[in-house]
Image (spheres, rainbow, N blue to C red):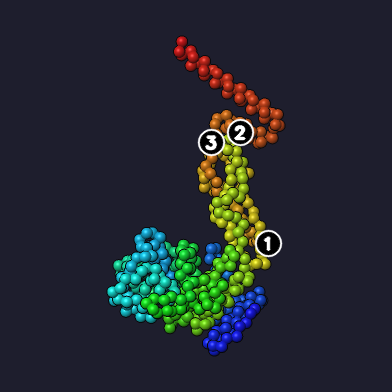
Amino acid sequence: MKIMLVRSPRKFCTSVYILLLVLFTVCSIVNAKSRSIKVNAKEAILIEAETRKILVAQNCHERIQPASFTKIVTLYLVFDAIENGQIELTDKIPISKKAWRTGGSKMFVKVGTRVPLEDLIKGIAIVSGNDACVAVAEYLQGSVENFVDKMNEVVSELGLKDTHFTTPNGLPSKEQYTTAYDMAMLAAKYIERFPQALKYHSMQEFTYQGITQKNRNGLLRKAPDLVDGLKTGYVANAGYHLIATAKKKNMRLIAVVMGAPKPYIREKEALKLLYYGFGNFTKVNLLDKGKPVVEVKVWKGKVDKVGLVAQSSGHIVVPSSEKSKLRLEIDAPKSLFAPLKKGEVKGIAKIISGTKPIKEIKLEVEKDVPKAGILKRLYHSVALMAVNINISRISLVAASSLILILILYLIVKRRRRRKRRFY
């Protein structure tokens, strides 16, 4: 590690703080197995983004005011509207008096002007502009009230049962609430649907109308090689909030800290959670969605074999110490009968750690398999009889030959009858 001496007292203090923070988190990793994680906040949760697996949880279902976490839903609706072709990044959004007068953290938009949508997105994601939230709410739904109704529809669709909004920006309201669990699930879905959003959430500062403001998420400066989002929040009666996300190799983690007593504590605790997750858990993929897992014999079909493919991916997150214990068990029939339809579930793949089942994945037919012609079906009927009564291969061939002779005899006889009709 290279340590540089700086003359500026402010820079020196910042460097010392970062050094101490790194040392603290390294110690957290070393001691993680010998102690449970305790977070200095009212509630907290750590999840893996794709699988939604909970790695750490502390009072994560207690209701609390969301503060500026609310803006994630606002941005969710903005990106959804862009995706659906309702609006474009270059659209000029009018600024009303209501937007201009909105208090709290501001982007400093001016009444009567028109601001490019992309600038408003930056104003919300980077500097947490309450005024920018009102502007996009009015533009998308005609009024703040209509927009909030739409926000709560999204909350319901996503299954966030302990979340309700009354504003588009999170300004204090007794009727507005959420939980750390709901916010973790929201953040995971948000990143999953709109990965391009991280481009904005990871920006360290934003300049608008000559005013430069830093991103409220201090971890972007303190751990720039790790953290790439997501959102801060604060209201007096709830405390300091932070959703921090980071990705290493194939694993993205989301840490949610709510109700921390100080801004630097929410950062320290969120970073502690991220280091704990990366230091103690591994993401493993034993199956790829849509790829054949096993090949099964097909009776009486136009093809003799068909693949059974995984209906979903086999991604799982396990303690690093358990990775070597993982195994895959396939529960599927040895053979199937045509006709078969693509997507029919015909088996299960079980991911097991030691003797403990971890995950089950349905196996479905890879493609349509129509019935074969009459000759092949008859042949397979005889073959199945042979299998069932265990007769010899010679007997099978003899029986098949007799059936073939019988079929040929019937065909010749039918042709002779047709000829007689024409005489």
Which mark sits nearer the N-terminus, 2 or 1?
Answer: 1
Residue 64 shows in the view = no
- Image marks 1 and 3: residues in contact by CB distance under 8 Å: no
In the image, which disc is placed on residue 325?
A: 1
**Residue 335 horizontal/vertical position (percent):** 61, 42
Lower position in the chain sequence, tag 1 or tag 3: 1
Look at the image and tell me in which quarter the N terminus lies: bottom right
Q: Which residue is mark 3?
A: 371
The residue sitting at the front extreme is 7
Q: On the image, numbered disc 2 is attached to which residue?
A: 380
Q: Residue at x 54, y 21 (%)?
A: 411
User: In the displayed structure, does residue 35 sit left or right of residue 214?
Assistant: right
Where does residue 413 sit, x and y in percent of width and height?
54, 17
Q: What's the amino acid at mark 2?
A: His
Q: Amino acid at mark 3?
A: Lys
Q: CA distance from mark 1 to mark 3?
A: 42 Å
Image mark for residue 217: none
